[in-house]
Amino acid sequence: MNYRTLGDSGVEVSEVGFGAWVVGTDWWGDRSDEETIEMVQLALDQGITYFDTGDVYGHGESEKLLARALDEYRDEITLGTKVGYDFYNHPQAGHGELPKNLEPDWIRTCVERSLDRLDTDHVEYLQLHNANVDEVTPDVMETLEELKEEGLVDALGWAMGPSIGWLAEHERAVDLDFDGLQTVFNVFEQTPGRHALDHIEATGADTSVVARVPHSSGLLNEHVRPDTELEAGDHRGFRPDAWYETGWEKLETLRFLERDGERTMGQAAIQWLLSHDAVASVTPTFYTAEDIREWAAASETPPLSDEEVERVEELYQTNFGIDRDDGMDSLRSSMDGDDIRAAGINKQVADD
């Protein structure tokens, strides 16, 4: 495993991180607490030291399970969590989005509760969860800086989502000098990540990108194949058939990235993201122990050559040779998609 730093914060993260939205929830398959803890500890054994959770995941259960799994390894890991949703006073309705609350006092309260669940006196990385531009006020920034000064957090981030879009938020996170921003970014869904990287480069900022959904919700790691039957409740089951059909066709154009067995497609998708200097970590959605072993090892597979990166770019610019609609024309963002439409960008949706 290789390691990178979030911005200029000094906080180190493994190039492959553990997205703990699978911990304490059943949106990505049902597993026991013991099975979950075994997965987390296996990830640590494979060199993963960055664990990215959120207070809303399982309404606190993800944080509690991470604390159990990582207690004796606390000094060896980087913990990241997120705040911004009020699940304390509102029930969860299926996969629906909960009301947000980013008032300064509420942020502090949530951080303190997260620290209690995580059984720690600080987290290395605190992120605002899906905050809109107008919600990150000077008072919010002052509160975040106070939390840093008090030693409760070491680095600050802004996690974008749950849908693709949020371009204004990417720019604002960079302009406010956040140490990191988390966004959807993968070979098929490049718009958010590219926009962030372009703004980072244009401003000379030190903000890092943490890439989520690196496998385009199962396509690039071939978890979802033409004959796959998704479990009841799996969020990917809500996608139209056309999205999968076009995705499988696109995938075949990328077979050259496997380079005669030196990398799996899932590993190549991660290495493509790591070819961008500002990407600090990639957080796949781990379903099984085999996923952990394969994707953690991606950090040590051959980096993409300049020629491979250029070939991916050429394919992306021509939509991988696909000239029909993929059925994903609807988009939610903090600006109702206006930021995407104004940029003339194809609209797609991706979940954690």
Image (tube, rainbow, N blue to C red):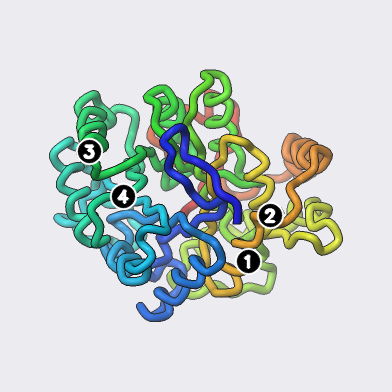
User: Is residue 73 left or right of 262 when viewed as pictured?
Assistant: left
Mark 1 or mark 2: whose residue is earlier in sequence: 1
Q: CA distance from mark 1 to mark 2?
A: 10 Å
> Residue beneath label 1, please?
224
Mark 1 or mark 3: whose residue is earlier in sequence: 3
Q: Are marks 1 and 3 in contact (CB under 8 Å)?
A: no
Q: CA distance from mark 4 to mark 3?
A: 10 Å
Residue 326 position within the rendered picture, expressed as x and y whole percent measured from the top left: 64, 49
Q: In the image shown, does 217 or 301 lie closer to the viewer? A: 301
SS at mark 4 in the image:
strand
Q: Are marks 4 and 1 in contact (CB under 8 Å)?
A: no
Residue 11 position within the rendered picture, expressed as x and y whole percent measured from the top left: 43, 43
Residue 221 position within the rendered picture, expressed as x and y whole percent measured from the top left: 65, 62
Q: In the image shown, does 80 or 349 lie closer to the viewer? A: 80
Q: Is residue 341 above or below residue 234?
A: above
The residue at 43%/38% (across/down) is 10
> Residue beneath label 4, please?
123
The label number, if any, that marks residue 147 in the structure image: 3
Mark 4 or mark 3: whose residue is earlier in sequence: 4
SS at mark 2 in the image:
helix
Question: Is there any visible trace of residue 24 in the rendered image?
Answer: no
The residue at 86%/61% (across/down) is 260
